[in-house]
Image (spheres, grey):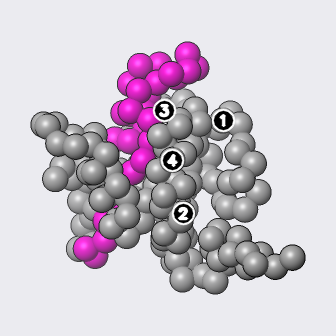
C-alpha cells in the first residue's frame, strides 16, 4: 500500500483521495492533478490528522478492487470534482451510498453539479498552484477536511435527507 502522506498526530485515520489521474481539459496543464494532490491535498489532510492514500500506485493489481476497497474502508474521502471526471463521479456515488464522510473540492472555475452543489459544501481551491497560493489554500482545505470529519455523525447527511422521502407519496 502506497502512503502519500503520514499524519504526525498518530490518529490512525485514513483519507483516500479520488481525483482525475490525467488532465482532459486544456485549461489544466499536464501534471496539474499530480501537483494538486502532492502540494495541496496531502499537506492539508495530514495537517488535519489523516494518513493519505490514492489509487495512484505502482505494480500490477486489479485497480478497481483497490479503489473500491480503499473507497469504502477509508475513514474519510476527499473527492476532487474538477473536470467532472466520470470515474470520480462514480466513486463519489459509491461513497455517498455508504453514508460515510466525503470532503468535496474543485478548482475555482469548475461548473457546479446540480445534485451535489445544492446539498453539499464544495470547497474551491485556486487552480494557480503558485507557492503563495498553496500557502493560503492548505489551511483552508485542512479546515474543510477537519470540518467534514467533525460533522460525520450529523443526521443531515445526503443519504439520510434523500431517504426521508422514500416511500412517501
Residue 46 visible to the viewer: no
Q: Residue 43 placed where, x, y %?
A: 36, 52
Q: Which of the two discs, 1 and 4, sits closer to the camera?
A: 4
Image spot of residue 2 (x, y percent): 18, 49
Residue 129 badge: 3
Which mark identifies residue 110? Answer: 1
Instruction: Mark 2: give few (<14), some (14-19) or many (20+) Cα within 10 Å.
Output: some
Q: Residue at x 31, y 45 (%)?
A: 64
Determine which of the numbered discs, if any, sits on residue 96 in the image: 2
Residue 38 to residue 66: above or below: above
Mark 3 to mark 4 CA distance (whole Å): 27 Å
Quick one: which residue is furthest to the right in this view?
A: 169
Q: Nearer the viewer, mark 3 or mark 2?
A: 2
What is the CA distance from the residue labelled 3 to the residue labelled 1? 15 Å
- Which labelled disc corresponds to residue 90? 4
List the single residue furthest toward the left: 59
Label 3 neighbour load within 10 Å: few <14, some 14-19, many 20+: some
Q: Residue at x 81, y 79 (%)?
A: 168
First in residue order: circle 3 vs circle 1: 1
Q: Is residue 148 left or right of residue 75?
A: right
Q: Earlier in the sequence, mark 1 or mark 2?
A: 2
Q: For residue 20: magenta?
A: yes
**Nearest to N terminus: mark 1 or mark 4:** 4
Specify start and end residues of the magenta stretch as a single range.
11-38
SS under mark 1: loop
Which of the two discs, 4 and 2, labels the residue nearer the N terminus? 4
- Toward the top, the furthest residue is 26
12 is higher (above) or lower (below) than 153: above
Amino acid at each position: 500500500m502506497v502512503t502519500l502522506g503520514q499524519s504526525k498526530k498518530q490518529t490512525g485515520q485514513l483519507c483516500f483521495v479520488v481525483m482525475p489521474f490525467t488532465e482532459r481539459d486544456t485549461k489544466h496543464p499536464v501534471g496539474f492533478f499530480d501537483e494538486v494532490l502532492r502540494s495541496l491535498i496531502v499537506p492539508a489532510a495530514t495537517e488535519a490528522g489523516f494518513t493519505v492514500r490514492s489509487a495512484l500506485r505502482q505494480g500490477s493489481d486489479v485497480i478497481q478492487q483497490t479503489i473500491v476497497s480503499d473507497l469504502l474502508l477509508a475513514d474519510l474521502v476527499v473527492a476532487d470534482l474538477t473536470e467532472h471526471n466520470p470515474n470520480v463521479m462514480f466513486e463519489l456515488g459509491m461513497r455517498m451510498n455508504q453514508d460515510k464522510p466525503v470532503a468535496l473540492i474543485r478548482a475555482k472555475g469548475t461548473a457546479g453539479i446540480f445534485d451535489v452543489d445544492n446539498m453539499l459544501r464544495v470547497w474551491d481551491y485556486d487552480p494557480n498552484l503558485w507557492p503563495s497560493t498553496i500557502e493560503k489554500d492548505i489551511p483552508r482545505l485542512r479546515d474543510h477536511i477537519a470540518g467534514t470529519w467533525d460533522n460525520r455523525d450529523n443526521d443531515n447527511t445526503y443519504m439520510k435527507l434523500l431517504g426521508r422521502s422514500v416511500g412517501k407519496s
